[in-house]
Amino acid sequence: TSPWSFFEMAPLDPIIGLNEQFQKDDYPSKVIVGVGAYRDEKGKPFVLPSVRKAEKILAEGGLDMEYAGIAGEPRFVDLALEFAYGEDSAALKEGRIQGVQALSGTGGLRVFGEMMKKHGSTTLYLPNPSWGNHKNIFTNSGLEVKNYRYYDADNSSLDFEGMVHDIKSMPAGSIVLLHACAHNPTGMDPTLEQWKELSSVIKEQDLVTFFDCAYQGFASGDASKDAAAIRMFVEDGHLISMVQSFSKNFGLYGQRVGALSVVGRDAEEAKKVVSQMKTVIRPMYSNPPRHGARLVTTILEDPQLTAEFREECKGMADRINTMRGALKDSLESAGSTRDWSHITDQIGMFAYSGLSNEQVLEMRAKHHVYCTGDGRISMAGVTSDNVDYIANAIHDVAK
Ligand code: PLP
């Protein structure tokens, strides 16, 4: 008998599975706006020119292929922390912020979850809605996952009051996960004043604040500006932890580049936490891959390449914003009388269209336009060539 005979076919991942379904569709004008990966004006995957330059520098560098340490490339970690917390961060200068390289955002989230479970945490709160993978990552880490209010579906806006109310009701010791910027999937972030209020509300509670920073640079086009909430929390004295992904801003999706960090009361405390991260990493995957981290290091170590990177990142954010305007205009030209202003109000990679699941399925069947079941449209996949087609499809099912 086969040891596998009782294995059932697992359901497709809701987002990755969408790609597989799309590949099988042979309709000529099919469009996919599902996965959150940037596409250029021609709808093609985009490698940043600064990354290409860094690749060349690395290729000529004759580097070895030895193992990285459990915590990855130390130079990369230093630069990643400066990138998020700011070169001028007092906490960084005091050595109170320490971190490890992570298997991109996903890997860092999982290491954090496992470490917190090992240290007695029981519950983690996610915004409702949140990135689809969050719940499974933390459930698999052994934590109970609960939600706090975030999105007001009736008004396509941030339910800030609900959010504050729910945070105030969280039991002491709970972990609250906040999207640092460009909230996925809603594209709605608190304003700076609202962040300030959240900082003081969270301060009054005994909570663990955990930032997921997956789109630094994609919200405003300026990576430093997008770190405002994180920097404010650290300045306000929060002892946060944070995961960073370099998938979107550096376009390094498949290279799996990320960092997981912690702000301690002092350097020794932060180092103790990092030592615990390492005890989670070692039996899980031993150590992270080096190439992507070396690419980011090469760029961030060089002021000229950093300036080029910042410009290219802004270019991606700008193109997406242009497409937000174009999609809204096309919907109006298609004859839609609905209010689509949320499309241009939202920021980051996604438009949370407000389409229902039935409308999404109808749009897939009738128009071969693929977005996720919650009506999230990856604006990164919208181009001047397909925007009218997408707008007509949305209008047709949303009428
Ligand atoms: N966190 C959020 C909010 C995301 O949207 C994503 C990717 O879509 C990630 C984390 C993790 O991405 P990666 O593992 O590619 O860094």
Image (cartoon, helix red, strand yellow):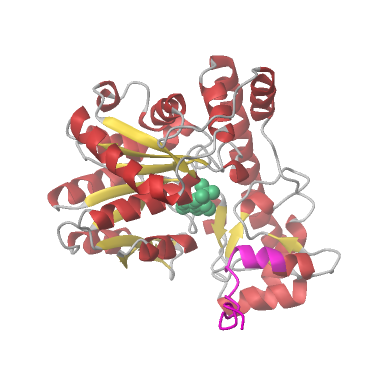
Would you place residue 181 above or below residue 86 in this image? below
What quarter of the picture does the C terminus occupy?
Answer: bottom right
For residue 270, which quarter of the picture? top left
For this view, does 199 lie left or right of residue 212?
Answer: left
Give the residue at x 84% y 69%.
Answer: 27
Would you place residue 319 above or below residue 373 in this image? above
In reply to whether residue 3 is colored magenta, the answer given is yes
For this rendering, which residue is in front, 238 or 247?
247
**Residue 47 on image: x %, y %:** 69, 36
For this view, does 380 lie left or right of residue 223?
Answer: right
For residue 23, which quarter of the picture? bottom right
Would you place residue 333 above or below residue 254 in this image? below
Give the residue at x 54% y 29%.
Answer: 66
Total count of labels: 0
**Residue 267 on image: x %, y %:** 21, 28
Q: Is residue 177 visible?
A: no
Give the residue at x 57% y 69%.
Answer: 14
**Residue 168 on image: x %, y %:** 18, 60
Range covered by the magenta-colored residues: 1-20
Q: Is residue 283 visible?
A: yes
| View extreme (front): residue | 1
